[in-house]
Amino acid sequence: MQNNNLNISLNADPDSVREANETIGEIIKRTRLQKGIEIEKASANTKLKIQYLHAIENNDFDTMPAPIYAKNFIRIYANYLGLDGVEISKKYDLKNIDVIGLPPKKKIALTYYISSFFHFLFRHPFVLLGLVVVVIILFFYPSFSDDNQHDSEISNPPPVTQSLSLDNYQPVFDLNDPLPKS
């Protein structure tokens, strides 16, 4: 079992030194006995099982369902006894700091992002409709724009009258002619 001691300053009064050296269970049990409260009555008033109250008083927190339950049971029991439940549960936190920590962050799978994207699309039908229209336009646009020119080129190919050679090459324009004015 681990020790539940807190660090204290040298100028502290003797009662706080004694309380700082006591474990959580010792503080709670001493307070309950000073007030003359039976553990059965404490169990009935706090709605906590007697076995958990015994576990708290004996510092046997391993019998609790989980560390977060132990922390809350300590807070409830301490508040019932007139103690500062938040401060005593902080003392438990100092003892179990590595147990109560958050789990490590996991890497999110690609399938999560894909399913989120499709979920968004199906929840917003206008976005889905717009996306479908854009895809259709992009798919069929080249065939619409070149349709007339492409058909005429295929149906009327230019006649081949001469062989292709650089000897017969004639430029389309004369380099000495001035450019037309616009």
Image (cartoon, rainbow, N blue to C red):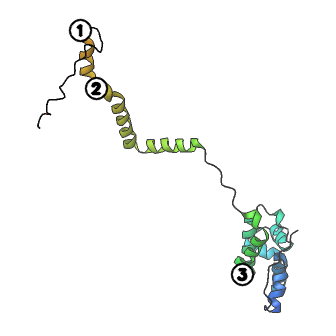
Residue under circle 3?
84
Residue under circle 2?
144
Q: Distance between the residues labelled 2 and 1?
A: 27 Å
- Whichever of callouts 2 and 1 sits on the residue coming sooner in the sequence is 2
Under mark 1, the amino acid is Pro
**Among all residues in the image, which is located at the extreme top?**
161
- 24 or 30, which lies in front? 24
**The C terminus sits in image quarter:** top left
The image shows residue 84 at horizontal and vertical percentages of 71, 81
Under mark 3, the amino acid is Asp
| Helix, strand or loop for disc 2 | helix
| Helix, strand or loop for disc 3 | loop
Q: Distance between the residues labelled 3 and 1?
A: 102 Å
Q: How many circles with numbers are drawn on the protein? A: 3
**The N terminus sits in image quarter:** bottom right
The residue located at (85%, 68%) in the rendering is 60
Residue under circle 1?
159
Under mark 2, the amino acid is Phe
- 50 or 29, which lies in front? 29
In the image, is residue 181 above or below residue 107?
above
In the image, is residue 15 above or below residue 23?
below
The image shows residue 145 at horizontal and vertical percentages of 27, 27
Q: Disc 3 vs disc 1: Cβ atoms closer than 8 Å?
A: no
- Whichever of callouts 2 and 3 sits on the residue coming sooner in the sequence is 3
Q: Disc 2 vs disc 1: Cβ atoms closer than 8 Å?
A: no
- Whichever of callouts 3 and 1 sits on the residue coming sooner in the sequence is 3
